[in-house]
Image: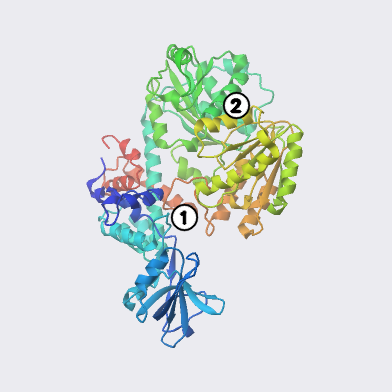
Amino acid sequence: MRPEVLNPLFVETSALEGVGPKMMKPLEKLGLTRVRDIAYHLPDRFVTRRPVKNLDEASEGEQIVIPLTVVEHRASRNNRGPYRVLAQDDAGNVCTLTYFGRASFTAKKLLPVGEKRWASGRLDRFGDALQIVHPDHVEKEGSASLGRLNEPVYSLSEGLTQPRVASLVEQALGRLPYLPEWIEPSQLDREAWPDWRDALHLAHKSENRSARDRLAYDELLANSLALLLVRADNRRRRGQSIIGNGQLRDKLQLPYDLTGAQSRSVREIEGDLAQEAPMLRLLQGDVGAGKTVVALMAMLIANEAGKQAALLAPTEILARQHYETLRQMAAPTGVEIALLTGRDKGRARESILMGLLDGSIDIVVGTHAIFQESVGYRDLALVVIDEQHRFGVQQRLQLASKGKAPPHTLAMTATPIPRTLTLAQYGEMDVSRLDEMPPGRQPIDTVVVSQDRLEDVIAGVARHVEGGQQAYWVCPMVRESETDDIAAAEARYALLKERFGGDVVLVHGQLRPEEKDAAMERFASGNAKLLVATTVIEVGVDVPAATLMVIEQAERFGLAQLHQLRGRVGRGSEKSVCLLLRGSALSETGRKRLALMRETQDGFRIAEEDLELRGGGELLGTRQSGDTPFRVADLEQITRLLPAAHADARLLMDRDGGLSSERGQAARILLYLFERDWGVQLLRGG
């Protein structure tokens, strides 16, 4: 149960003054559905304005507050042009207040001719005239404007304005309860951080690093504590010890020896499986590092001990792909492998369900369907989860209900994650890293080409396709908006369709799943030669005949994402090429990013450098930053503060594993505040 003291924060946003059904839509787009979300909707930046008596005291490009007397209104002839209000300062200098679109109605009301008003905004020059476009504020009295010399700027969605969000924030801050302190006192003193309530107030008022750090630390502490509680709970559970005799693994006829990293990972997994406490291990491997072989070895150990294993994939396409790969690799062993997805119906499904119940199926591969209530197992002892970041801790905890005892869990990800972020996202797991590539993997030629040479690139793709090979074309992230990205992809698809006709297919996030699957299927089977997509191309999609990857405006992507996309090619015996098309305006960070992509294919090095490049200044949206599990802490804060937060969480657990002390009780409130309460629920009587 959520502590009562937090109830005011979890009231819906509609309880705030001025929020009706119409405003709920833009608020929902920003994820602001409760009072707590509004309180934590921290400003992106602050505008600092200078009060001036007249225009002679101001500079072009400066944010100012100035008293002006309205002289004349000038509407444009065709309604589409700007609406201008001419005004004079006390020295007789003229300044134009310019409005566009519907804002002209506001201008008529706010600025009556002959009256003095205080205008706030950025002073610019248009031709010979000084102007303020869309003044931020127009007030009758100077005191209101002067009270806004340092003003927060919030991210918005269509239908919201800065004043409206500021008003909601003010209401939300007014409802903040007083909460007990959960941070270790020595840490609080050392950093001289304000208490939680003051920190939230300060973070909305000015660029207060101390307040921001305090709030980020709270979130990191909540996450670390929840993950440590999962780990402790897992170690208390009694699973089943699995010891294989090597019989099935000896029958495998792999065309190559395992790398040192693969052998080491198999040994670590074997050691975990032999323990009674259920394994909770993450297998991190770069694209093509051979995670599937390690997963098969783990599943065969379970089979050797007379147990069943399941492999969970995030999409149906990936499930089918894993099924085919595992069937071919495991053929000499004679183990029975089945595929179960949501699409399976009727007798075929019944037959698989019976096989799982009577134990005649040794390994099942599938989507979430393999954990539906209607699916039972004779003795499920190991679950392998592919593309770990698609499954939250809560889903992992649900797996414990299948099998006679909680099954061992091996999670896999092809996203190389910097060590700091591994701790943030997978702090409850042991980690194995496949940091060597199997022999025979051909390096991918990476070439940076100017976007101006688009015609040459299309001609090159045509030659490539005519030669019988396939290609990917990934479209740019236009803005932090899904619809803009899709528009860009659809425009590029239309252009390429003129050239390639039915040989080109399109995939993006808003297609219906069956349309997306059909397009991917056409490409995977070779019936389509060119796949145009936004960044939704499935991680792990394996099309060996695809040997060319074109990424438009590559400088807009994070390094980790570029590396993932490049990994879609280079999967067969043919030489592969990745073309990075760059725009003309290339930032220093963008240039370094593309240079590093040319220089290395080591995903772990790329992940570390990516974090460093994005560190302080240029923090990208979550869609490019590997989706960190945090809303308050940015990447720079995660890197700097997480080790201390993790140590603090460990101290709390070691001293007070049940969180029953005074600080432990405060920490429970923290877990509920950041919705990491699955951690609390694992405590006895939590």
Residue indicated by mark 2: 293
Which mark identifies residue 152?
none
Q: Residues within 10 Å of mark 1 (few under 14, many from 20)?
A: some
> Residue 210: x, y in percent?
40, 62
155 up-or-down from 240: above or below: below
Nearer to the camera, 417 or 105: 105
User: Which quarter of the rendered picture does the C terminus lie within?
Assistant: top left
Nearer to the camera, 280 or 416: 416
> Residue 383: x, y in percent?
47, 26
> Residue 220: x, y in percent?
41, 49
Helix, strand or loop status at disc 1: helix
Describe residue 574's horizontal placement relative to residue 418 as left or right.
right
Residue indicated by mark 1: 637
Dot 1 or dot 2: first in sequence order is: 2
534 up-or-down from 217: above or below: above
Q: Which amino acid type is shown beneath numbered disc 2?
A: Val
> Residue 597: x, y in percent?
66, 48
